[in-house]
């Protein structure tokens, strides 16, 4: 369902048509506050009052709720919206795709403004900070302004239990260690409260890879979009106004998967994994070689040809399962045949290359072999990585 402050306004559509682009351009100077909600009815009146009170005069601000609730949150928003001087709309999703992160990305896609502020509905993110986030972004010409619990002057006591404080601190440190460059200027990469310029979102999406997974949408946007400059505003993460937190242990596990996916998306990491899987193929290869020579009396050269293909099959299954799970764009038969062809070409190409290095460049056999292997491996990896999968 969709509701809006005035009944004549229709719900925002996911993709602006050409005629609507003019409207979006007009809203260019404005700010859209995107708020994901899941059963937050009791927080809405206070939240909207406080947002309304903190918007500076002349600042064109609209509030867009992206709602996955099963309670009456959308109705409460609708009812509250009419008494406020703000443009408030609700986009209720029939399918809560991507959870919190998915909701945020959908809200950003629906908004037309140059700045987007993302905040929670439970008042743990103080609305009074809204003008400061934008002012700081303009002043510092930053693409991203993060409201931080960990910057000087910030506070995270509202997290509640000591356990959650610990988990939050440890996961923040681990995350920063995993992405030292991308997160150099960010003390709170897990923050759910930030102002972001549309350009940066566009750049992150340009990598074709913003696939929100749960809570940590900011981390995803930073790692994918690589903001040119980031500013921070310290704040006190308050206690929840009403209702209860939706973050669960399952959300924590999701976060670990998210980290793994973000980290393993770099080419060097994939090359390393590809190499490790390739090495693991020696095991089935040797086992089959042993079985064939000992049990069937097949000549060892013929046995090795067969054993090698078994090793390749093993490698193929592993890279399909572990490395390129969501990246298939060709049929399975084409993938298998190309993979096997590439791997056999690799074997065949090594010898002449080695010979070239020895007789052409005067290398001794060991470095020549190593060089040939490395070269052929790199070429094979790049072919698989760039052409066979996406
Ligand atoms: N649409 C939608 N769909 N909204 C959701 C969903 C969902 O599946 N799950 C949670 N939300 C909304 C909640 O209604 C709330 O407005 C906001 O997302 C945050 O949820 P909380 O349950 O209050 O999360 P938290 O307080 O534990 O953690 C928050 O604050 C941290 C510090 O800034 C989150 O924003 C974390 O990402 C953040 O690290
Ligand atoms: Mn909360």
Image (cartoon, rainbow, N blue to C red):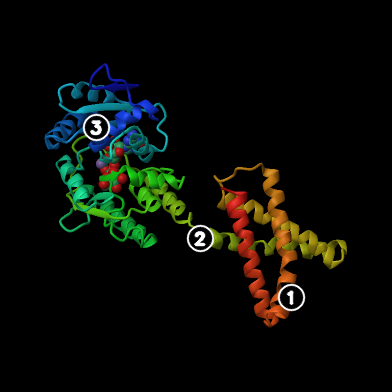
Give the vertical position of 22 relative to 285 (above or below). Answer: above
Q: Quadrant of the rendered structure where residue 360 is? A: bottom right
**Residue 358's spot in the image, x, y percent?**
71, 79
Q: CA distance from mark 1 to mark 3?
A: 68 Å
Q: CA distance from mark 1 to mark 2?
A: 31 Å
Residue at the limit of the structure toward the top, as seen here? 8
**Residue 90's spot in the image, x, y percent?**
29, 27
Front residue of 146/174: it is: 146
Front disc: 1 or 2: 1
Q: Judge the density around disc 2: few (<14), some (14-19), many (≥20) Cα neighbours within 10 Å.
A: few
Front residue of 143/267: it is: 143
Q: CA distance from mark 3 to mark 2?
A: 40 Å
Which image quarter has ligand 1? top left
Quadrant of the frame with the N terminus: top left
**Pointer 1: what residue?**
355
Image point 74% across, 75% down: which residue?
355
Q: Earlier in the sequence, mark 1 or mark 3?
A: 3
Q: Judge the density around disc 3: few (<14), some (14-19), many (≥20) Cα neighbours within 10 Å.
A: many
**Pointer 3: what residue?**
63
Give the vertical position of 11 relative to 191 (above or below). Answer: above
Q: Which mark is residue 269?
A: 2
Front disc: 3 or 2: 3
- Considering the numbered disc 1 on the image, is that residue within a helix, a strand or a loop? helix
**Residue 332's spot in the image, x, y percent?**
67, 43
Asked whether mark 1 lies closer than 8 Å to ligand 1, one says: no
Q: Which mark is residue 203?
A: none
Give the vertical position of 152 relative to 370 (above or below). Answer: above
Front disc: 1 or 3: 1
């Amino acid at each position: 369902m969709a509701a809006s402050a005035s009944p004549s306004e229709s719900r925002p559509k996911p993709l602006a048509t050409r005629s609507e682009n003019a409207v979006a351009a007009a809203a260019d100077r404005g700010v859209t506050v995107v708020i994901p909600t899941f059963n937050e009815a009791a927080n809405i009146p206070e939240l909207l009052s406080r947002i309304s009170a903190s918007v500076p005069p002349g600042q064109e601000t609209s509030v867009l709720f992206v709602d996955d609730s099963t309670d009456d949150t959308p109705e409460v928003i609708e009812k509250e919206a009419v008494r406020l001087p703000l443009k408030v709309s609700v986009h209720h999703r029939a399918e809560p795709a991507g959870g919190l992160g998915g909701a945020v990305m959908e809200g950003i896609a629906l908004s037309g403004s140059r700045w987007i502020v993302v905040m929670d509905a439970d008042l743990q993110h103080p609305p009074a900070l809204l003008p400061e986030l934008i002012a700081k972004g303009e002043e510092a010409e930053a693409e991203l302004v993060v409201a931080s619990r960990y910057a000087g002057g910030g506070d995270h006591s509202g997290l509640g239990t000591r356990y959650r404080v610990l988990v939050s601190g440890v996961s923040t440190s681990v995350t920063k260690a995993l992405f030292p460059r991308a997160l150099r200027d960010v003390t709170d990469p897990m923050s759910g409260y930030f102002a972001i310029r549309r350009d940066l979102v566009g750049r992150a999406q340009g990598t074709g890879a913003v696939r929100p997974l749960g809570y940590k949408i900011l981390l995803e946007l930073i790692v994918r979009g690589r903001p040119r400059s980031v500013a921070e505003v310290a704040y006190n993460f308050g206690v929840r106004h009403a209702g209860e937190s939706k973050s669960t242990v399952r959300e924590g596990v999701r976060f670990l998967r998210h980290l793994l996916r973000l980290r393993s998306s770099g080419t060097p990491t994939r090359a390393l994994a590809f190499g490790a899987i390739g090495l693991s193929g020696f095991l089935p290869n040797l086992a089959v070689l042993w079985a064939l020579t000992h049990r069937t009396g097949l000549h060892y050269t013929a046995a090795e040809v067969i054993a090698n293909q078994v090793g390749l099959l093993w490698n193929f299954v592993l890279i399909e399962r572990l490395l390129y799970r969501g990246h298939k764009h060709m049929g399975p038969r084409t993938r298998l045949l190309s993979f096997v062809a590439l791997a056999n070409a690799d074997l065949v190409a090594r010898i002449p290359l080695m010979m070239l290095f020895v007789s052409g460049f005067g290398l001794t056999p060991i470095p020549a072999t190593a060089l040939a292997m490395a070269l052929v491996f790199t070429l094979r990896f790049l072919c698989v990585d760039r052409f066979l999968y996406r």
